[in-house]
Amino acid sequence: MNEKEHDQYIKRINELARKAKSVGLTDDELEERNELRKRYIQAFKSNLRNQLENIRFVDEDDKQ
């Protein structure tokens, strides 16, 4: 997921969240929200996994 897609997912998730609090969501909107949340969580996990895999521990002498 690139940054633009990420921003669009967040924007739409927030729109649906506001609507859910005010007037409620249709069945289609509930499905859309759930799918967007699922994609967002997958992307988050993937990014976190990549960050953790790139962590390198070094000792005081900068030896890995």
Image (tube, rainbow, N blue to C red):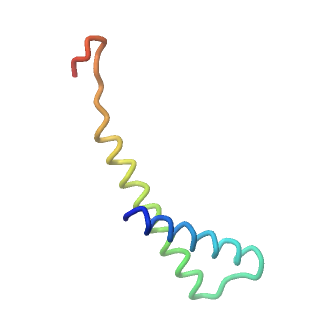
Pinpoint residue 7: horizontal percent, then vertical percent.
50, 65
Task: Please count the marks in the image.
Answer: 0
Q: Quadrant of residue 10?
A: bottom right
Residue found farthest to the right: 22
Vertical side of 54 occupied by 17: above or below: below
**In-image side of 24 versus 8 (left or right):** right
Q: Nearer the viewer, residue 3 or 42?
A: 3
Tell me where residue 44 sits by quadrant: bottom left
Residue at horizontal 46 percent and vertical 65 percent from the top: 6
| Residue at the far top in the pictured view | 61
Left or right of 38, for residue 22: right
Q: Compared to 6, does 51 lie above or below?
A: above
Q: Position of residue 22 (x, y in %)?
A: 77, 77
- Which quarter of the image is occupied by the N terminus? bottom left
Please tell me which residue is depicted at 63% across the width and 76% down the height of the picture. 16
Placement of the C terminus among the 4 image quadrants = top left
The image shows residue 37, relative to residue 45, as above or below, that is below
Vertical position of residue 25 compared to residue 21: above or below: below
Front in this rendered view, residue 1 or 23 = 1
Residue, far front: 4
Q: Residue at x 35, y 43 (%)?
A: 51
- What x and y, as percent, mark residue 50? 32, 47
> Is residue 6 rendered to the left or right of residue 59?
right
The residue at 57%/69% (across/down) is 11
Residue 59 coordinates in the image, percent (x, y): 29, 16
